[in-house]
Image (cartoon, rainbow, N blue to C red):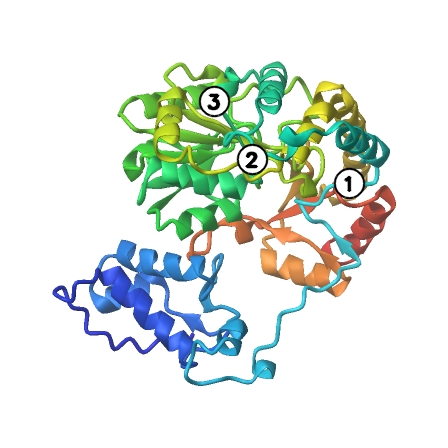
Amino acid sequence: MRELPIHIELESKSGKTLYEQIYEYIREEIRKGNLLQGERLPSARFLSDDLQISRTTVDMAYGQLVAEGYLVAKPKSGYFVGDVRELYNTGMTDQPVEAELLPREKKPEWRYDFSPTAIDMSQFPYATWKKITKNIMVDARSHMFALGEPQGDIELRRTICRYLHGSRGVNCDPEQVIVGAGNDFLLLLLEKILGRHIHVAMENPTYIRAYQIFRSFAYPISLIPMDDRGMRVDKLEESGAKLAYVMPSRQYPTGISMPIGRRMELLRWAGREEERYLIEDDYDSEFRYKGKPLPSLQASDRLGRVIYIGTFSKAIAPAIRVSYMVLPYPLLERYRRECGFFSSTVSRIDQTILNEFISDGYFERYLNKMRKRYRTKRDFLLGRLRDFEKDFTVSGENAGLHVLLKDKRGRSEEALEQAAAGEDVKVYGMGAFRMEEEQVKGPATMILGYGGLTTEEIGEGISALKKVWL
């Protein structure tokens, strides 16, 4: 690791906060070319000890630099200088650096990529979507091209309410629903509603993108360990957090479904103090293959403490980029008072197309088809994994689009990943989703996603893994 030569004289009388002084120093070092792309910075713990300041202060400085693109946070690896070539090209630095010194990292193409985020688009009803779009454009009037309501068109919000109540047990009125272009926007909007520097707790391991977004807000983050029922509420209470981000129906990436007892513990935690809230990310609740779909956490909320977030990106298509957030009434009033001037980020035409796709029954039929298709892929994968049962424990197969393989032979995740890479197969270790520097003890756990692969590709990929893992 290259130790960053911090020569700052931190001054309490400078008129700037300590985190601003650290932020500005590192930013200028990058702009001047003293720190180049890919160079690793000291950990937040090391730098806070070296400067004799709190780690939260360093976290806030690093978080701001990550948000602005000067730094890149890599799970379990630390902070690295980001791609700053455009910075040099626009003359924002005194020392130009040749572009060839900063090569862009090219994403490798894998023969078989068991990505847990990939989905199958081969069955998407393009003709139906095209027909709905054509009919809407033929009948479109001037109001279709007006700005529309900030929360989204009322017809789509009514449709979302009916869908959520019937499929997830969510209790809400259309006025509580906010439609946005992806979960990223909704979390950004939520930061404006809740305020700055809110202490948030997250499960560990967790959804990396949400973690990065909270870091960009300079939110203090507590990583809460999990057991086989989900986030440990005793550790949550000890953390002092006011906000908890959870995925109770199927935690990503562990696949844990939170039982009703643990859900009630979380709701009691939220109700014990004012201004405590739970963010329920219900990202892929549509795909469950054993038993009935689990009701949402929001369905059991009687105190208005659950902020429910969902998306159509996984169930329909990533390019749809339509997500929704259900705000409890106390936060709805705050949203209208302080954030109601933000315009909707989804065009009215796209909202109308989606509304008709759902309300006319096409969405339900498409979901039923995809459940069957994903179930077929899952069953085929599980059949091919029977040969692995001596060396691995298979879990997480009852829902979602990935399964987990826990190694019984004491091998590391890195070793398993490298062996797979030798066969041109991309697999994912659980450690990549743990937001901490320390190495977690325990067996290596590998994540195999099957949503974006054909059964033929699944079979060939598993045959390749069998050569190097068994």
Q: Quadrant of residue 158?
A: top right
| Residue drawn at point x = 40 percent, y = 62 percent | 65
For marks 1 and 3, give the CA distance: 32 Å
Left or right, 204 with reference to 201: right
Q: Quadrant of residue 323?
A: top right
- How many discs mark residues in the rendered view? 3
**Which three-letter amino acid code belongs to the residue tagged 2?**
Leu
Residue 151 position (above or below residue 55): above
Residue 283: % across, % down? 59, 34
| Residue drawn at point x = 23 percent, y = 57 percent | 54
Q: Residue furthest front?
A: 142
Left or right, 401 with reference to 224: right
| Residue drawn at point x = 30 percent, y = 60 percent | 58
Residue 154: % across, % down? 57, 22
**Which three-letter amino acid code belongs to the residue tagged 3?**
Gln
Left or right, 309 with reference to 396: left
**Which three-letter amino acid code belongs to the residue tagged 1?**
Asp
| Residue drawn at point x = 59 percent, y = 38 percent | 346
Left or right, 456 with reference to 149: right
For marks 1 and 2, give the CA distance: 33 Å
Disc 1 crowd rating (10 Å Cα; few below 14, some 14-19, many 20+) is: some
Question: Which callout, 3 or 2, points at the residue further toward the start of the chain?
Answer: 2
Residue indicated by mark 2 = 147
Q: Are marks 1 and 3 in contact (CB under 8 Å)?
A: no
> Regarding mark 3 in the picture, which secondary structure is present there?
helix
Residue indicated by mark 3 = 176
Residue indicated by mark 1 = 120
Question: Which callout, 1 or 3, points at the residue further toward the start of the chain?
Answer: 1
Does the rendering let one see residue 225? no
Residue 238: % across, % down? 28, 36
